[in-house]
Image: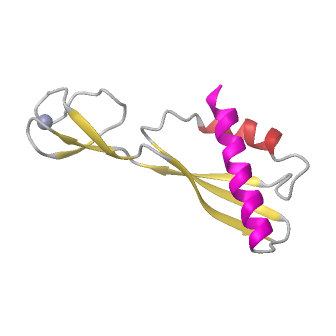
Amino acid sequence: MHEMSLAEGIREIVDEAVRTQRLGRVRTVVVEIGELSSVEPEALAFCFDEVMRGGPAEGARMEVVGVAGSGLCLQCHQTVAMHRLYDACPACGGYQLQPRDGMEMRVKEIEVE
Ligand SMILES: [Zn+2]
């Protein structure tokens, strides 16, 4: 399950921020999840709770902000909405979409008490 390693990555970022910015207890971690990142928000939330145990973000809430997927079609040169990787272009039906947005998962904000 790759959500576990993603959650561990989030913990590293959170721990680092708490250490370097001398933050208190973390209340909420806002995570951006791209539509094309193939990250399951529910699975990630589950791993998040597990991984944060014993750290400054134990019991913190993970808030998910979705990022819509989009891609550039190499066939008709339009930027189109993408909901899944390897989707066909909704404009021309071609299969040469190059993803642009919505590929990543990242920590957007850390809210502390
Ligand atoms: Zn197209």
Where's the N terminus, which quadrant?
A: top right
> What is the tally of numbered marks visible in this picture?
0
Q: Residue at x 19, y 34 (%)?
A: 90
Relative to 69, 89 lies left or right: left
Q: Quadrant of residue 51?
A: top right
Q: Position of residue 39 (x, y in %)?
A: 55, 35
Eyeballing the image, is 36 above or below 20? Answer: above
Q: Quadrant of residue 95?
A: top left
Queried whether the magenta region covers residue 9, the answer comes back as yes
Q: Position of residue 105 (x, y in %)?
A: 53, 47
Relative to 27, 35 lies left or right: left
Q: Which residues are magenta?
A: 1-20
Q: Residue at x 22, y 35 (%)?
A: 97
Q: Position of residue 75 (x, y in %)?
A: 9, 35
Eyeballing the image, is 13 above or below 43? Answer: below
Eyeballing the image, is 92 above or below 68? Answer: above
Foreground residue among 5 and 36? 5
Foreground residue among 55 and 88? 55
Relative to 18, 63 lies left or right: left
